[in-house]
Image (cartoon, grey):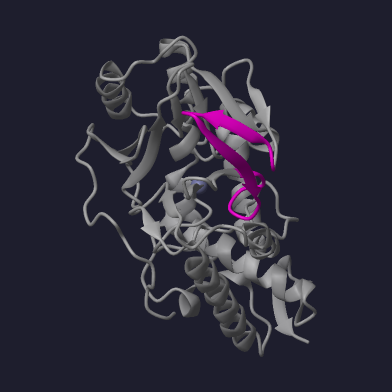
Amino acid sequence: MKEIVVDYPWETFPATAETREVASGIHWLRLPLPIQLNHINVYLLEDDDGLVIFDTGYNTTQLRKIWQTVLSSFDLGKRPRILCSHYHPDHFGLVGHLCEVYGFELIMAQTEWLIASMLPNVDNKLMLSKQLDFYRFNGMDKQALARHLERGSNFKETSSGAPPRYSCIKNNDHLRIGGRDWQVMTAAGHTPEQVCLYCADDKLLLSADHILPRITPNTSIFSYNPGTNPLAEFMKSFRSFSHIDEKTLALPCHDLPFYGVQKRIRQLIEHHEERLDTLYGLCDTPKHAYQLIEPMFSRSLDAHQEMFALGEILAHLRLLETQGRINSSVVDDVERFQKN
Ligand SMILES: [Zn+2]
C-alpha cells in the first residue's frame, strides 16, 4: 500500500477523561478499550435541547466511571441524546447504561438498532457452536478450533442492553444539532447501515468506522450471516460520499482526526483492489479461506484477530466470486476457491 497521504491537525490524543474541542461546540473524547485496538473516539455535541453524544465505548466499569467524570462537566440539558453509529460493542456497549442512568434517548439506524437489540439475548454457547461449524467449513485445523473453543464467546456481555425505544434515522435525513445542519449518510460494509454525519456548511464529517485515516475498517463475513457480500457494498458505498469537500475535517472513531477524505477513500479502494488481486493470484490451486490467512497477513494473529482475518478473506473471496474471477466447491465438508 502507498504512503499515507492525509493531514492531521492534531498530533496527540486528548488524555483519558479529558475532552478537546475540535470545532465550536464539538468535543473529542478518547476512551480506552480492552482489545488490541486500544481506544475509541467519541464526540460530544452541544445543543440547546441537550447534549448529543456520538457513540459510547465498551461496556466496562472503567468506562462507566470515565463517563461519570466527563458528564459532570457538561450540561446534559432537558433532552440528552445518543446518536449511535453502529451496533459494534465499542460503539454501542454503554448505550443501555447511559440511557438508564443519565436519561439519554437513543437515535440509530434501523438495522443497527435491530442487531444491537438482539445481542443481549444471544445464547453464547449456541453462538460459539455455530462459529466453530463455520470455521471448520472454512478449513480451520483442530488446534486452531481448540483455541477458539477455549476463547469462548462473550457476545452477550459486550452490551449493557438496549433501551426499549429509539428514534430511527435513515440515509439522507437531516438533523439539526448545535445550530448546524447534519446530513445522515448510511454506509454498508463494516456493518449493514453504519451512520456518518456530514455538515457541508462547516465542512465536518463524523466518519465513525467507515473512513479511518490509517487502518482499513474491518469488512468481514461472519458465521451468523455467511451469505453476505460486505466488501462489494463497502466499495459501492463511496459513490454517495463524492460530494464531501476535500477541506472537510473528518472526525473518525479510531485514530486521529484528519483532512483528506477523498484521498483516503481512493486509498481504501486501491488497498482492497490490491488485496483482491493478491488473493486471486493465490487461488491458482483450490484453497480454503483458512489457509489463505498466512500469505495474506504476514504477522501472527491471536484467536480474536484470526476471526477477523478469516472474515476479511471470505469477504474478498466472495467479491472475486461475484466478479466471476473465481469459483468455489465443497469437498469433504470444506469450501475451497479456485481461479476460473
Ligand atoms: Zn465497528
Q: Position of residue 43 (x, y in %)?
A: 39, 36
The stretch drawn in magenta includes residue 287: no
* Quarter residue 48 falls in: top left
Q: Residue at x 60, y 78 (%)?
A: 273
Residue 136 or residue 44, whichever sits in front: 44
- Whether residue 291 appears in this view of the structure is no
* Quarter residue 197 falls in: top right
Q: Position of residue 288 (x, y in %)?
A: 64, 73
Q: Position of residue 235 (x, y in %)?
A: 65, 65
Q: Is residue 319 above or below residue 127?
A: below
Residue 295 or residue 204, whichever sits in front: 204
Q: Is residue 249 above or below residue 107?
A: below
Residue 283 as seen in the image, left or right of residue 103: right
Q: Position of residue 107 (x, y in %)?
A: 59, 27
* Quarter residue 226 falls in: bottom right
Q: Is residue 80 above or below residue 234?
A: above
Residue 56 or residue 26, whichever sits in front: 26
- The C terminus: image quadrant: bottom right
Residue 56 or residue 168, whichever sits in front: 168
Q: Residue furthest front?
A: 201
Q: Residue at x 69, y 42 (%)?
A: 172
The stretch drawn in magenta includes residue 192: yes
Q: How many labels, in total? A: 0
- Whether residue 324 appears in this view of the structure is yes
Q: Residue at x 46, y 9 (%)?
A: 78
Q: Residue at x 50, y 33 (%)?
A: 92
Residue 194 as seen in the image, left or right of residue 47: right
Magenta residues (range)? 172-194
